[in-house]
Amino acid sequence: MFHLKEEDVPVPEEAPPTASPAPPALELSRVVKSFGAVVALRSGTITLEEGSIHALIGENGAGKSTLVKIIAGLYRRDAGTFRLRGEDVDFHSTAQSKASGIAVIYQEPTLFPDLSVTENIFMGRQPTNRFGRIDRKAMRAETQQIFGRLGVSIDPDRVTEGLSIADQQIIEIAKAISLDARVLIMDEPTAALSGVEVERLFAVARSLRDEGRALMFISHRFDEVFALCDTVTVMRDGSYIATTPIRETSVDELVRQMVGRDVAELFPKLPAEIGDDVLVVEGLTRAGVFHDISFSVRAGEIVGLAGLVGAGRSEVARAVFGVDPYESGSVRLGGRQLPKGNPRVAMARGLALVPEDRRKQGLVLDESVARNITLAIRGSLAKAGLLWSGPENEAAAIWSSRLEVKTASLDAETGTLSGGNQQKVVLGKWLATDPKVLIVDEPTRGIDVGTKAEVHRLLSELAQQGLAILMISSELPEVLGMADRVLVMREGHLTGEFPRSEATPEAVMFAATADKEAAL
Amino acid sequence: MTTTAPETRTVRTYRAHAHPAWRRILLTREMAVIALLVVVIAVALAVVPNFDSPLTVTYLLRDLAPILLIALPMTLIIITEEIDLSVASIVGLTSVMTGILTQAGWDFPVAAVAAILVGTVAGVINGFLVTVVGLPSLAVTIGTLALFRGIAVGLLGTTAITDFPEFWSDLAKDNIPGTPIPGIMIPFVVLAIVFAVLLHFTPFGRSLYAIGLNKEAAAFSGVDVGRTKFLLFVLSGTVSGFAGVYFTLLYSNARGDNATGLELSVIAAVLLGGVSIFGGRGALHGVIAGVLLIGTLGSALRLAGVTSDIINVITGVLLVLSVVSASFLAWLRSRRISAIGRKKGRTSSAAEPI
């Protein structure tokens, strides 16, 4: 199924530059890893230099995770060379990798929630005093010293339960530093962070670079790659494609390398005829979450809702749809008021919500593709109250084929599909309800560039057909590229509204943060 | 694979099923239980004396009827990842109510309907505590198990009411004319069909599985999770009430301690029938086969002269084996899926979160 034609297999033409005086901190060359007949990594090549941040990018399935797992000691390579400071290594376990000074920070850190920050950092190797007891003072002092170096302020004595993911990542980094890791690998660390948190993480990463450590940064967000990294390596279909200094490349160039062809436009916004107000929200308030939110979405219009993570955008969407409560204000759809807290009425009147978290809120992962696509239209598929699998499969096949969902069969469990295809199933599920207003919350989070472009094209076409779309997104390029109008929220308040022509990154970021610094 | 060019739009066709029909129908847990039931019956017919007597069938089905009845709503409740432990206490309470009201001179049908309504109210209390107050059903129904039983015993003390109109108690004991099958099987079969259609062929049934597998996604799909569960507890109370009236008539005996421990037999049979205690999985024909399997096995062993403690041991082992086999199969499946996930490692993000 995944066989590629010969000519599609990219062959690395030249080795990445290795002409530095000292041996590189970490060097992988033409590393191969296969699982049975399936080759996950054909030619993994990357060179991390000390005092440098190296980005690794590629679509989902390009082999990045496999490469990281080989470095972390989770997998053993089948072929190729793996050198650490010029010496050949072969890890049999993660412990060996750690002992060799490699630390991997994952998207979601795994800390002991009931232990203190300090205890987590020194888990399993607590310093002891003369009497063989744990030397809490020394532990605490070193923790504070590390935090000082990183320029962060987290109380070393508090339990880690309740800390934000950003703070937990900082703790993982602190742990790596206390182990004196020379190579730090960050696997999509920013996926769950807000703008301010990303900035702090970047500041920490830069200070580590300046201390002479080698960092590898995996991200789907180009703006972050360009803001943080010195060098970028692109992978595609398990193979090394190119390594370029960041100054000598561009987003277009990287996208071309990632997908293997020119993507004419990542954000194919089509001109659409804008009609009347369809969704009108007035004075929507939920104490402590969002206040006095008023906006409208017109037929054929894509309204972007930008802001930092935690600004209350998803909460507004959920309240409008009816899964969350609100205290005052009103939601009108096609001129009629929607009752509070009743998603079924909202659905029946033509409102659809593609939620933020597709795995938890969007899909029943253990159910089949067909059952998921038809879950929201189960009532209308029934004849005389009875629901047979025939009509279910027909409806599911229509939407699967319209959205080009890649699945072996309609009864395949949705959880076995890739992230992008899962998102298509959620979109299909809601488009099947034939909505008048579609709210999409982070429609392209965690999906690869190719599928992203497909989703954008789909939204664009839907708007052209007269659908009113409210698109919540934390990716500024997506909002600016797709929206006819941009709304911005900050800390539960609507702080800006810009027509497409006036929506510049600076203006939107300023409204989102009220901070001129962050806007620059 | 993921890099499909936006400009090339091909019309895909989809297979509805990955496997042929015979595999989907025959290679299921439900069919395994049914097959085991057939084997037990065949062996018992061959080697156990008197097992082939019509009386065996009559007594077996009569005794199983309350379990069969209550297993129907219990299946739905467990599929939504809840549980109702108070069903046997509701049987006891409605049995006592039937007795007291009959003794007080009510017409029996009126007394019976009133007793069933008491079961409904008991279900409403469970449903209210679980869905409105938001307590876990395990805790709530352990509480109401004691509460309803306490009321039942409190109302009648240690006495029993044994005087019921002959017409009704005969009706409960009579067979379908010309067969060894007790008459109670008629309402049971009707209810079983209703519940099977409800669970497997209605939008409501679809929402039950969705709730059991992912409450949040169900709510985001317009399923009123609270109302659905409330309804199930009310159904459970009502059916238990009906079983209570039947129980009273069958044994001509209304006592506070009637049907003590029956809830465990019901839940055991539901789980044996292939319903997952974690919700979202199971089918009604498996549950019915599960009840019949436990009952038939017990009956055959009793006829073969095996003592009841040994029978308990054997049913216990069977249950543990069924749970272990389910976990084992799930483990096999997860291995298969993770193998697929590894294959897809190159093209997917979801399979490997790291």
Image (spheres, rainbow, N blue to C red):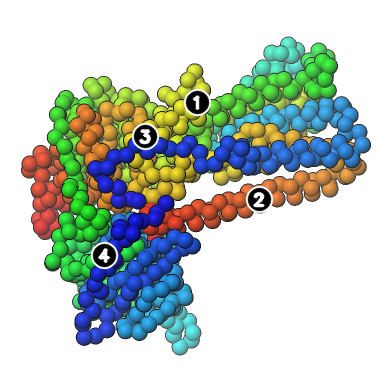
Instruction: Please state the horizontal and vertical placement of residue A513, each as a whole percent of the image.
Output: 16, 52
Q: Which amino acid, mark 4?
A: Ile
A136 and B19: which is toward the camera: B19
Instruction: Please state the horizontal and vertical placement of residue A301, each as a whole percent of the image.
Output: 18, 33
C-alpha distance separating marks 4 and 2: 47 Å
Q: Is disc 4 surrounded by few (<14), some (14 to 19) or many (20+) residues within 10 Å?
A: many
Q: Which mark's residue is nearer the viewer, 4 or 2?
A: 4
Q: Which amino acid, mark 2?
A: Ser
Query: In this rendering, would A401 be left or right of B314?
Result: left
Residue appearing at x 32%, y 74% in the figure: A29
Outermost residue on the bottom side: it is: A130
User: Which residue is labeled 3 in the image?
Assistant: A399
Q: Which mark's residue is nearer the viewer, 3 or 4?
A: 4
Q: Is disc 1 surrounded by few (<14), some (14 to 19) or many (20+) residues within 10 Å?
A: many
Circle 3 SS class: helix
Q: Which amino acid, mark 3?
A: Trp
User: Which residue is labeled 1 in the image?
Assistant: A387
Outermost residue on the left side: it is: A502
Q: Do we see residue A239 in this rendering?
A: yes
Residue B314 in the image: above or below residue A326: below
Instruction: Please state the horizontal and vertical placement of residue A358, each as a whole percent of the image.
Output: 37, 45
B18 and A266: which is toward the camera: B18
